[in-house]
Amino acid sequence: RTIKQHNISTMRAIQREVEAFLGGGLLSLAAKGALKKSKLVQKSVYLPRHGVRMHYLEREPSRSDESKKNDKRSTTRTGINQETSGSTTKSKDEPTILFFHGLSDSAKNMAGFVHSLNVPDHIRILVPDQFGHGEDLKRAKSLDESEASYQHPTQSTLLESTSEFLDVVGVGSNCNAFGISLGGALAYFIRLKRPDVIKRTVLVSPAIEYCIDDAFIDDFLEGRKRHMCFENRQDVKLLFRDLSTGRDTDKRKRKDPVPKFFLEAVYRKSKQMAPEGHYKQMLHGLIDNIGKGAEDGGENESIFSADKDVDSTSPRLVIWPDHDYICNYEKGRRFFENSIQEDNKGTEWIQIPDCGHVFHRDGKIILQIEWVVKKIQDYLFNFSALSSSGFGSQI
């Protein structure tokens, strides 16, 4: 190499270090601040049927002294209406909201959004880390370093482990759920499986099998795009463009929805947190099972590969951006079309114009759009009595 090329290379390396330092510091500071404001506390529970611990964030409800006295009197009189999870007593009708994150995301990254909703203090909040994500990455790395086999989660695993989690932490019969992307699909299926617990759901771009964009699948399988399976900084930049209204469009104010100095920090954090090739193997597993039903041929066999809503009377709010590269808007509309007819009030459908899977064309994150947040608040905070037998069916 020439001296000039060497100097350029050196300067670029220094620039990357500075970007990683600044971007990483800001990301860490923002994450810690959001977690503190949300009042969510890191916890974990052992799932006996799965033989592993599930990590989650929880904000326990604040309750008046009078309310506690009334609960104690009620329990003394009837001997029922209470369940115990760990050392904390939970009321069966205690209002609870579940939040499910997306693929390659984590419970902690949901803290800022949870805080922005201003959830009333009397409502319990639970945000589980799905297997292969968040705090569970430590287990994946530990097994990888010891050359042991880590079992990547499937749709069936995610559903069954979440169902067991609800029982172990004592979620009662007055629970609403929110999910985005992979978490949106999980919220859809957990409502179908557990109508005794989940009453209303908010689904944002739910990554239900039928609704996944064909181009997203083909681009990954044929190696044209790596999506969230980063191999370099450029992959991060292109993914963020795809998560907006597309990498090739010139119709938005900023081509890159996030400042460039964040890209190096995001790339390094992804390499630091997860074992090499972790998300690539996970995504391959999820995609390879599309159309095949549950891998065990058991009770979940047909629901994952359905091409239309199999729980059409379930009360839900569906929010879908019209430029979503991952979860196709038109396929989503077809999937739910029988549920959103005028004579069926089960599904309320909301379209977000000029918006991608994560970012609006103006650069704003989808879960920071004011009118979207207001819609979610109005729906999630409604705990009107609903009979578990009146909607859906227990799988």
Image (cartoon, rainbow, N blue to C red):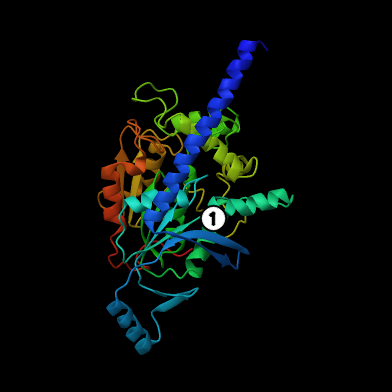
Left/right of residue 184 with respect to residue 47 in the rendered view: left
- Vertical side of 392 occupied by 368: above or below: above
Query: How many numbered badges does the structure rendering display?
Result: 1
Q: Quadrant of residue 122?
A: bottom left
Instruction: Give coordinates of residue 240: x percent, y percent.
Output: 46, 32
Q: Nearer the viewer, residue 265 or 349?
A: 265
Taking the view exactly as shown, the residue that stands out farthest to the bottom is 77
The residue positioned 49% from the left and 29% from the top of the image is 237
The residue positioned 63% from the left and 64% from the top of the image is 51
Q: Quadrant of the N terminus?
A: top right
Q: Nearer the viewer, residue 326 or 134?
A: 134
- Which residue type does callout 1 highlight? Leu
Q: Which residue is mark 1?
A: 158
Q: Quadrant of residue 69?
A: bottom left
Instruction: Give coordinates of residue 167: x percent, y percent.
Output: 49, 69
Instruction: Give coordinates of residue 299: x percent, y percent.
Output: 55, 60
Identify the element where label 1 is drawn: helix
The residue positioned 56% from the left and 40% from the top of the image is 270
Instruction: Give coordinates of residue 284: x percent, y percent.
Output: 60, 41
Q: Nearer the viewer, residue 312 or 166?
A: 166
- Regarding residue 127, the answer to whether it shows in the image is yes
